[in-house]
Image: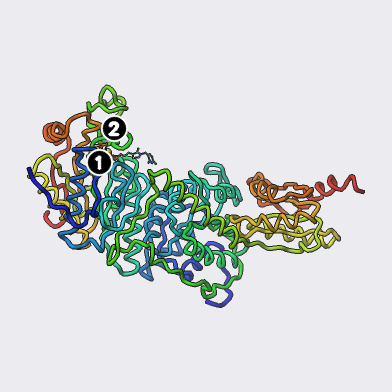
Amino acid sequence: MQVYAKPKSIKENSSFTFCSGCDHGLALKLVASVIDELDIQQDTIAVASSGCSVFLYNFLEVDCIESPHGRACAVATGVKRAHKARNNDKIVFTYQGDGDFASIGLGESIHSALRGENITAICINNTNYGMTGGQLGPTTAMGQITTTSPTGRNREYHGFPIKTAEHIALCEGTAFSARVALYDIKNIYNAKNMIKKAFEYQKKGLGFSFVEILSSCPTNWKLSPSDSHKKIKEELTKVYPLKVFKDVLNG
Amino acid sequence: MSEKELLKGNIAIAASALNSGCECYFGYPITPQTEIGEYLSYEMQKRNLAYVCAESEIAAINMALGAASTGAKVMTSSSSCAVSLMQEAISYACCDELPIVIVNVMRAGPGQGYIYPSQGDYNQSTKGGGNGDYQVIVLSPSSVQECVDLTSRAFYLAQKYRNPVILLADGMLGQMAEPAIIDCNKYEEIDNSSWRLDGAKNRPAREIHSLEPSQLKLNQHILNLKKKYDLIENSEVDYEEYMTDDADIIITAFGTMGRCAKEVVNHYRMQGVKMGLFRPITLYPFPLIRLRELSYRVKTFIDIEMNLGQMLKDVQLAILSNASVAFVGKPVGDWLKKEEMIEAIDNIIKEQYAGIR
Ligand SMILES: Cc1ncc(C[n+]2csc(CCOP(=O)(O)OP(=O)(O)O)c2C)c(N)n1
Ligand code: SF4
Ligand SMILES: [Mg+2]
C-alpha cells in the first residue's frame, strides 16, 4: 500500500468529505502536490464549481472563489484578466465536474480554450452528475445505466456522449489537452505529470491547458472502489482513450 | 476633460467608467447600448486594461464575478432581455458581496420586445430578477450629465458596500446627445485589501462562496446582508424635487420620464396649478420616507412611467395619507408625448376635483 505525504497546499486539519473510494480526493491531492512542487501556492487562485468538488476551499490552502454551475472558465477568465490588468500574473485554475465543464458550461469552456485563455482547467469525468445523485450527463457512455437512463444510454433517447479532451484539443488556443485516469499507480504518476505540465504551460503563458481525469464515482455507480477502477480500466478507457491530444511544445 | 462636450448617453457612461477607474469590462452586443462596448474596446486596449468580447451575457457577468473577486473595478453593460440572462450571477454577486457595476440601457419587453426605449425593468432591477433575499443598488439617470455622475457613483457605491450596482438607463438616454462634463472623479478609493483574492501570501487562504450547508451560518449571512441593506437605505437615498414646496399635485417619475415630466409641471404652473415633480434618483434605496412626508400635505400623486406601473407600487406603499394616486403610462411605442401626458392629467384633475367644484 502506497502512503502519500500530505501536500503542504492541503489545509491542515481538513479531511475530504467525498464518499469513500471516490477519485475526487486523489485528484485533488495530485493538484495540491503539483502546486507544492511548482511553489505557486501563494500565487494561485482556484475556481471551484458546482458539483461534488464545490467545497474545494475547505481542502486547499489557496485563495478560492466558487463559480455558478458551469461558469468556472468564465470566472477564471475574469480573475486572470483582472490581475493581468494590474501587471500581476497569477496562476488561475478551475476544478470542475464533467457536467459542469462539458454540459451546462460547454460554451464557457470551449470559448476559453478558443481565446487561448491562459488558465488551467481540471475536469473530473465520472460519467454522471455525481452531486445530484448520478443522472445521465454529457459523458455518460452508451448503454450506461443512470437514474435518468434506467435502461441504459441509447441513441434514440439520449444521443451520444462528448469526448471532451478531444474537442478541447481542436481549439487553436489550446496549449495542452490530455485525458488521464487514476486506477493504478502507474496512471496516478502519469496523471500527476500531466497536471504538472498543464500548470507549467500556464506559467509559460502558452494558452489554455486542460486535463480530463477519468474518475470513479463508486456511490452512484453502485460499485466498490476497486470494481469502479476495474470498470474504468476495462470499459471506460475504451470509450475515452488515455492520451495527450494536444501539446504545443511536442508536436 | 473638465470641459463641456456634446456626448451621447452611452458614450458618457463608457467615458465616465474609464474616468472612474474601471479596470475590467466584459460584454456582449445588444442594441441600444452597443456603443458602450465599442468605445471601451478601443480605450481599454490602449491602456492595457482587461476587455473581453464575451461569448454571451452569462459569460460576461461571470467574468465580472471573477474579476471583482480580485478587488478590481469591474463593469458590464447590456439591455433588458439580455440582462435577464445575468440574473443568476447577480444573485451570486450579492451573496458573495462582490462589487460589479451593471449598466442596463433598457429596451422594450417582455421577451425580445424591441429596441424602443422603455422603463419595463424597474421591477427586475429593484426587486431582484434572481433567486433569494438580496438587493442591488439601482441608480436612475435622467440626463447625459447624470449618466456621467451616476456611473462614477455606481463604482464608488459598489466598492463601498461590496454590492452590485445597476445603472438603469433607457434607450432614449443612451442614444441622445447633450452637453456634459466629465470631471475628475470625486470619490475616495475604498481599501479592499482585507477580502480580495490576490494569492495567500503571508496570510491564510481566503474563500468567496455562496453555497452554505450550515443552516445557522446561512441564516446569519443573510441577516448580515440585511443589515447592510438597512444601512444603504439609511445613507444613500437620493432624489430630485422640483417645485414641490407648495404643490397640491405631485408627479412621480424616474429616469428620462422624470425629465419629460418637468415640462408638464411647467405647463401647469403657467396655468396656476400648484404642481411639482418628485424624481427618485436611487430606485433602490427608494426615497420612501421623503415621499411619505410629502404625502401628508399633497392631495394627488400622479405616477408617470413608460411601463404598466411598476414604480407605482412603491409610490402607493409610501403614501399613508388620504392622498390619491393616479397612473399615466404606456409600455412601448413612442415615448409619452407632452400633449398625451397633459390630456391624461387634465382628465385626472377633472375627475378628482369634480366633487369639490
Ligand atoms: C444552474 C444549476 N443547475 C443545477 C444545479 C444542480 N447541480 C449541482 S451539481 C450538479 C451536477 C454536477 O455534476 P458534475 O459537474 O459532473 O460534478 P460531479 O458532482 O459529478 O463531480 C447539478 C446538476 C445547480 N447547482 N445550478
Ligand atoms: S457522489 Fe460520486 S463523485 Fe460525488 S463524492 Fe460520492 S463518489 Fe465522489
Ligand atoms: Mg460528474
Q: Residue furthest bottom?
A: B2
Quarter in which the C terminus of chain A is drawn: bottom left
B270 in relation to A47, above or below: below
Pick the residue in front: B340 or B121: B121
Residue drawn 35% across and 67% down?
A: A85
Residue type at the position of mark 1: Phe
Q: Chain of mark 1?
A: A
Pick the residue in front: B97 or B312: B97
Question: Is A137 on the left or on the right of B320, as rendered?
Answer: left
Residue drawn 86% across and 61% down?
A: B272
In this picture the colour scheme is rainbow
The residue to which callout 1 is attached is: A18
* Residues at marks 1 and 2, CA–CA distance in whole angstroms: 14 Å
Mark 1 vs mark 2: which is more N-terminal? 1
The residue to which callout 2 is attached is: A134
The answer to whether one can see residue B129 in this image is: yes
Q: Secondary structure at mark 2?
A: loop
B21 in relation to A52, above or below: below
Q: Which mark lies nearer to you, 1 or 2?
A: 1
Q: Residue furthest right?
A: B357
Residue type at the position of mark 2: Gly
Ligand 2: does it lie within 8 Å of the C-beta at label 2? yes
Question: Is B306 on the left or on the right of A113, as rendered?
Answer: right
Q: Secondary structure at mark 1?
A: loop
A245 in relation to B202, above or below: above
Ligand 2: does it lie within 8 Å of the C-beta at label 1? yes
The answer to whether one can see residue B32 in this image is: no
Picture quadrant where residue A65 is located: bottom left
Residue drawn 17% across and 50% down?
A: A30
